[in-house]
Image (cartoon, helix red, strand yellow):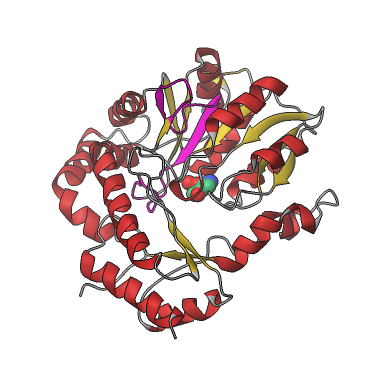
Amino acid sequence: MKKIQMVDLKGQYEKIKATVDASIQEVLETNTYINGPLVHQFQADLEQYLGVKHVIPCANGTDALQIAMMGLDLKPGDEVITADFTFAATVEVIALLQLTPVLVDVDMNNMNISLDGIRKAITPKTKAIVPVHLFGRAANMDAIMAIANEHNLYVIEDNAQAIGADYNLKDGSKKKVGTIGHVGATSFFPSKNLGCYGDGGAIFTNDDKLAHILRGIVNHGMYERYHHDVVGVNSRLDSIQAGVLKAKLPNLDAYNKARQDAARKYSLALSVNPNIWAPTICESCDCHVFHQYVIRILNGQRDGLLAHLQEKGIPCAIYYPIPLHSQKAYASPRYKEEDFPVTNQLCKEVIALPMHTELDDEQIKFITDSVLEFLNN
Ligand SMILES: *Cc1c(COP(=O)(O)O)cnc(C)c1O
């Protein structure tokens, strides 16, 4: 059996080496390292793939979230609602911009932001909601957009984990996740579903005016050379990373399908055990693209299982071990423990199994057998 890895970027690269190498070579030969033609080509390809009017490439996913928020007319002290159970980048940029993060609990069934939690957190100061499509699964965008419209709030989608996922809207139309809110942000960190070989990110929007503002913000607030109209940042996707992404984008659907296939096999094997909660795979749509395959261990044995799997050479991880409201940087007297029962429980129960595009049946069987062997004892 091939050695099991949490993410197998080398195995993936070997299959696309010729196209990726050619793309990188093109950058080297044309010496266009910054804002080269490949950046614009990738931008256009991604706009077409996502069915969105504007993609603004930038340096990483955290910048993408920050710049998206800088482009909206938010003022210090404005409240921005986001999920307690997510990677810290989301709440970090809210705090950095001197906005007030308001963390709310998530739902047990999909681990995404709780609609009830959002409704209860809204105050006259609330200006935006940041849903995170956690682990690759689309948040309930119909309901989130309805709440936002009712209260006149912006919706900024954190799509770092769900690029390529589809969402079937109530009106019967289908949209790519990340293009439904006012603005979306994604990351091309190497292990993400569409990853480059370094850092990268992008912002999406269908709003022409906002897109124009964002294009200036990523470039030192310049709309005309050496005229700085707003305080901006320097955040660029470099040409080599754009070349890698342009070469990989045509494979994204196949990559997401490989992840779904692995997830289906995992869930089929694991859901027989009553101590395991395993995610279901939606057979009629692509609303979950399994950035991570996360199960819950319901009998209090999660940490024992983690040690058991590591002993067997199976890498696994806890996403996320500590709720954001319990982190020193984001603690606030506004939070009460009883407001976060689901996140508090998930942090004790979740475990992420290896998930990438190169998993084979032998590896999946070894992993599921090892999980069941521990829990059946
Ligand atoms: C990865 C990630 C980010 C940040 O992306 P970087 O490119 O690492 O800055 C933001 N939000 C979520 C949910 C992520 O998973």
- Comparing 162 with 225, the one in front is 162
Q: Residue at x 48, y 78 (%)?
A: 305
Q: Is residue 354 magenta?
A: no
- Which residue sits furthest left? 18
Question: Residue 164: horizontal and vertical position, in percent?
Answer: 36, 37
Please tell me whether the stretch drawn in magenta is mainly helix, strand or loop: loop
Q: Residue at x 47, y 50 (%)?
A: 135
Q: Is residue 70 above or below residue 274?
A: above
- Which residue sits furthest bottom? 377
Q: Residue at x 29, y 75 (%)?
A: 366
**Quarter where residue 337 is shown:** bottom right
User: Can residue 165 be seen by looking at this rendering?
Assistant: yes
How many discs mark residues in the rendered view? 0
* Direction from residue 97 to residue 162 in the image, left or right: left
* Direction from residue 249 to residue 345 in the image, left or right: right
Q: Is residue 188 above or below residue 108?
A: above
Q: Is residue 188 magenta?
A: yes
Which segment is the magenta one?
A: 168-197
Question: Residue 345: horizontal and vertical position, in percent?
Answer: 64, 63
